[in-house]
């Protein structure tokens, strides 16, 4: 039997390719505490065929906890970042765009969203749109979402023993889940990628284990409040 990983050891910090010097650098704040529509349902059953009704109950509990932990402001930050990964905005692959105080586009690697230091990424004197106020752009919401997704995945895999109705979860937060996983998976620097794997092991394991089911759900379910590119 595979040993269940300790949840206490999930957020292991490692080295990142990260600089904090010069006008275009990023700086950090805080401390290091990480702490019914009609659709085709696809249930991930546990090996002992536990009650599917319990799986629905477990899934609703996961959704409720995610919404409690991830506030509306966090979701709004995610939407802004997600919409600026689109190549039509000028974003290079594996980057997103913000604007500096002069209104010039600044390419930021998506991997920086998951830096372990402090409470997360803050881009000094920046804005998403030229009409926005120039400020220290706090993007720590993205790492906070990733940490919550890792806790969610741990519950799915080891607390609920995979007895969940995954389509219910995907319908609520599927686009967020997919984007966070994609941003992690596309990291090219091997050291940074290994660091991500060590800090978000359950989330990455869940996607690896259930990639086929998730691929199927993408063809059948459009997550609520999805962001679309025009």
Image: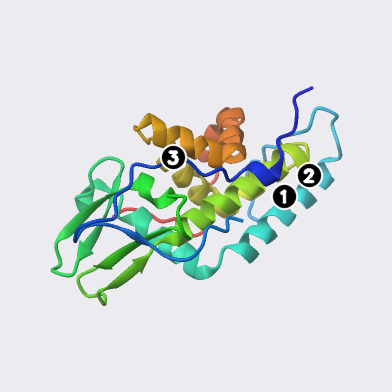
Residue nearer the viewer, 45 or 129: 129
| Circles 3 and 2 in contact, beta carbons < 8 Å | no
Is 194 left or right of 124, judged from the image as shown?
right
Gap in Å between the C-alphas at discs 1 and 2? 6 Å
Picture coordinates of residue 133, whole percent (x, y): 26, 77
Gap in Å between the C-alphas at discs 3 and 2? 28 Å
Quarter of the image that includes the C terminus: bottom left
**Mark on residue 184?**
3
User: Judging from the image, what secondary structure is the residue with disc 3 in?
Assistant: helix
| Circles 3 and 1 in contact, beta carbons < 8 Å | no
Picture coordinates of residue 93, whole percent (x, y): 27, 40
Is 141 left or right of 60, judged from the image as shown?
left
* Residue at the spot 21% in from the left edge and 63% down from the top edge: 99
Q: Which residue is mark 1?
A: 59
Which numbered disc flags the more N-terminal residue, 3 or 1?
1
Gap in Å between the C-alphas at discs 3 and 1? 24 Å
For discs 3 and 2, the disc positioned in front in the rendered view: 3
Residue ranking furthest to the bottom: 133
Are there few (<14), some (14-19), or many (20+) residues within 10 Å of tag 1?
Answer: many
* Residue at the spot 34% in from the left edge and 61% down from the top edge: 27
Q: Quadrant of residue 97?
A: bottom left
Are there few (<14), some (14-19), or many (20+) residues within 10 Å of tag 2?
Answer: many
User: Judging from the image, what secondary structure is the residue with disc 2 in?
Assistant: helix
Is 100 left or right of 175, judged from the image as shown?
left
* Residue at the spot 30% in from the left edge and 58% down from the top edge: 26
Picture coordinates of residue 216, whole percent (x, y): 55, 33
Q: Which residue is mark 2?
A: 55
| Circles 1 and 2 in contact, beta carbons < 8 Å | yes
Are there few (<14), some (14-19), or many (20+) residues within 10 Å of tag 3?
Answer: many
Residue ranking furthest to the top: 1
């Amino acid at each position: 039997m595979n040993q269940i990983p300790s949840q206490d050891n999930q957020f292991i910090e490692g080295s990142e390719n990260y600089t904090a010097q010069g006008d275009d650098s990023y700086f950090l704040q805080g401390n290091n505490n990480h702490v019914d529509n009609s659709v085709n349902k696809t249930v991930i059953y546990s090996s002992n065929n536990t009650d599917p009704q319990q799986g629905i109950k477990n899934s609703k509990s996961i959704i409720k906890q995610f919404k409690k932990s991830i506030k509306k402001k966090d979701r709004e930050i995610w939407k802004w970042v997600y919409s600026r990964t689109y190549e039509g905005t000028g974003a290079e692959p594996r980057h997103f765009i913000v604007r500096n105080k002069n209104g010039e586009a600044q390419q930021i690697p998506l991997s920086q969203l998951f830096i372990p230091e402090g409470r997360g990424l803050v881009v000094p004197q920046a804005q998403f749109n030229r009409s926005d106020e120039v400020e220290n752009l706090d993007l720590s919401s993205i790492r906070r979402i990733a940490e919550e997704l890792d806790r969610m995945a741990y519950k799915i895999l080891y607390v609920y023993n995979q007895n969940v109705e995954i389509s219910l979860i995907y319908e609520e937060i599927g686009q967020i889940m997919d984007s966070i996983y994609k941003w992690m998976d596309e990291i090219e620097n091997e050291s940074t990628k290994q660091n991500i794997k060590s800090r978000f092991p359950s989330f990455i394991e869940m996607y690896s284990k259930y990639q086929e089911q998730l691929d199927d759900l993408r063809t059948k379910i459009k997550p609520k409040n999805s962001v679309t590119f025009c």
